[in-house]
Amino acid sequence: MPHHPPAARRAMVLNMVAALVVAAAGAGACAAQAQAAPAREWTSPPPGDTARGAALYQARCTACHAVDGNKIGPAHRGVMGRRVGSLPGYKYSDELARSRLRWTPQTLNAWLQDPEELVAGQRMGFQVDDAQERADLIAYLATLK
């Protein structure tokens, strides 16, 4: 260990203490921000029309999804009530597989509105902006038992 005069050692110690105080204050601020984050408000979709939902599904979803087989996205039969990221035989993103969510009308509504906001790091690059169209799609998905 190099030899430093007492004044230099004292300055080094003070600099290290100051750095630790700044780091601890930053960590505390991050923890306070994380605790202050508002809880998600789940929104139920309005009543949906299954016939319109089936037509929307055919027009917008079948490029990546199928009812009974995996494509770019997972199969949708039985999606309602299934744990998110759990369909056997489909390789989900790690983020989606770890999400601990379950597909309900409320989670599907949030997912279709903005998948990345619901589960950051997921891979679906599509969203449905119109609330009634989301409701119609969700009503159709609920029929796929």
Image: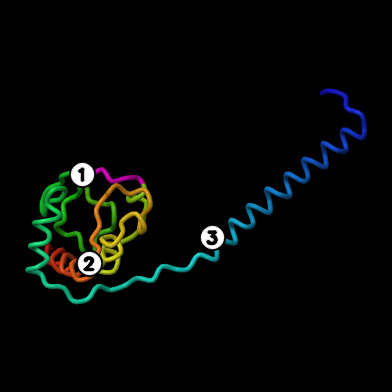
Mark 1 falls on what kind of element?
loop
Q: Is residue 44 above or below residue 73?
A: below
Given the image, on which type of amino acid does mark 3 rest? Ala
Q: Position of residue 15 (x, y in %)?
A: 79, 41
CA gap, disc 1 to disc 3? Answer: 35 Å
Within the image, what quadrant is residue 114 found in? Answer: bottom left
Give the side of residue 107 with respect to residue 30, left or right. left
Residues packed near mark 3 inside 10 Å, few (<14), some (14 to 19) or many (20 plus) = few
Task: Say which quarter of the image contains residue 48.
Answer: bottom left
**Residue 34: which numbered mark, if any?**
3
Range of residues picked out in magenta: 89-94
Q: Residues within 10 Å of mark 2 (few under 14, many from 20)?
A: few
Which dot marks residue 68? none
**The magenta stretch spans residue 107:** no
* Horizontal and vertical percent position of residue 109: 27, 66
- The three-letter amino acid code for the residue at tag 2 is Asp
Name the kind of residue labelled 1 in the image: Gly
Provide the major secondary structure of the magenta segment.
Answer: loop
Tell me the quadrant of the picture where the C terminus can be found. bottom left
- To which residue does mark 2 refer? 130
Q: The N terminus appears in which quarter of the rendering?
A: top right
Which mark is in front, 2 or 3? 2
* In front: label 1 or label 2: 2
Outermost residue toward the right in this view: 6
